[in-house]
Image: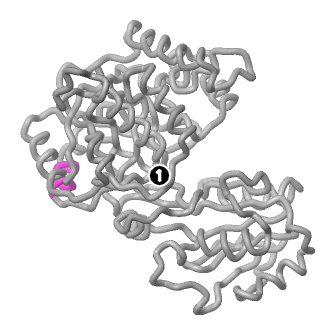
Amino acid sequence: MARIKPFKGLRPPKELVEQVESRPYDVLNSEEARAEAGDNEKSLYHIIKPEIDFPVGTSEYDPRVYERAAENFAKFQRNGWLKQDDKEMFYIYAQTMNNKTQYGLVVGAWVEDYMNGVIKKHELTRRDKEEDRMKHVRVNDANIEPVFFAYPDNQVINALVARITKEEPEYDFIAPIDGFRHQFWLVDDAEDIHIIVETFAQMPSLYIADGHHRSAAAALVGAEKARLNPNHRGDEEYNYFMAVCFPASQLTILDYNRVVKDLNGRTPAEFLTALAQNFVVTSKGTDEYRPQHRHEFSLYLDGIWYSLDLKPDICDESDPIGCLDVSISSHLILDDLLGIKDLRKDNRIDFVGGLRGLGELKRRVDSGEMKMALALYPVSMDQIIKIADTGNIMPPKATWFEPKLRSGLVIHKLG
């Protein structure tokens, strides 16, 4: 059963939140962060992307960069740009995209639940990326950015959230870049806190939606601190890490598409002929064409969009991994026809989140940078939960959640 707790969040004053908040560290590169921060010394990028304080070209993994993160974190607190709440509480974080709002609870998730599988994952993590985030957690002694969880829909939590969010929010702003609305409420009533803790204690599982590396790093540092503390009791703050938990039904998963640099020696005609072995290939003309259902793909090649409909009995629907569209495309198109064996390492392929639209796929092919684009039908939350519950792992680059969590609304200190 899931164990959570409230915590004393470290947050920007209401009048500073729009100067402090930022996109998460892993959705933009160093130069984009440098440009977005500009001359704003209060931007959280100085903590989560501190290489922007160094000359262009400085590695984000330079030891001085981690040290600067800690220096800047201390500076933010010293200058009052971040202030700690005086009592433990939960928080409600609402995001509105395309007139649809999702309501998340910001909680302290128990490290042991990650270790014992109550908090379930659906993606593999890379040790180098884990270690990068572990260094960031260690040097700051804090979870600067939250992870993104889903939980089974619960009417008790829904009713509580609906009641609290009728009140005036602590924060309410439209973020630059994405244009989405972000709202934030404090949950500091003792009875409400008790209801949340007890309701989550009845949930058999929580699910990592986004932020597998942050989750792993936060949990591993917590376990590390427990192991190194000779007086460890089990109730220390480092036994928990910060997560925003959303009802599964409210989440939006977008398509996660592929662009490829060449056809592995085939001409376009030969490639289309090869595809016809496993797919019904239909030309859709020059207008953008989006997949309409599972097992249908959209191909953009030489200025034309095609529908690729998987032929019957090609995949085993009882196989939760093999029948994923991301698995089908990886095996039957990228591997068999294009020779792309490792999606993580092959430099002939790149990935485009669905928020950028099919126009971005078309642009990258028409520019000559890429030869073809492949659009996929989005994975469902039910598929993710089924895979996590059965202990399986999804192929890489399978899910793209939107909207992304903004960073800097609240921070969890481990000390």
From the top left corner, tell me how far across and down residue 32 is, in percent. 67, 32
On screen, residue 95 above or below 280: above
Q: Secondary structure at mark 1?
A: strand
User: Magenta span has 361?
Assistant: no
Q: Residue at x 71, y 80 (%)?
A: 307
Q: Residue at x 29, y 51 (%)?
A: 116
Residue under pointer 1:
97
* Quarter of the image where the C terminus is located: top left
Q: Residue at x 33, y 36 (%)?
A: 242
Q: Residue at x 45, y 9 (%)?
A: 75
On screen, residue 283 above or below 57: below
The image quarter containing residue 77 is top left
Furthest residue toward top: 78
From the top left corner, tell me how far across and down residue 212 is, in percent. 46, 47
The image quarter containing residue 341 is bottom right
Between 51 and 86, the one lying in front of the other is 51
Horizontal side of residue 150 vs 60, given as left or right: left
* Quarter of the image where the N terminus is located: bottom left
Furthest residue toward left: 191
Horizontal side of residue 270 vs 65, given as left or right: right
Q: Amino acid at mark 1?
A: Met
User: Magenta span has 161?
Assistant: yes
User: Magenta part of the protein: which range?
Assistant: 156-162
Circle 1 Cα neighbour tier, 10 Å, few/some/many (<14 / 14–19 / ≥20): some
From the top left corner, tell me how far across and down residue 254 is, in percent. 54, 60
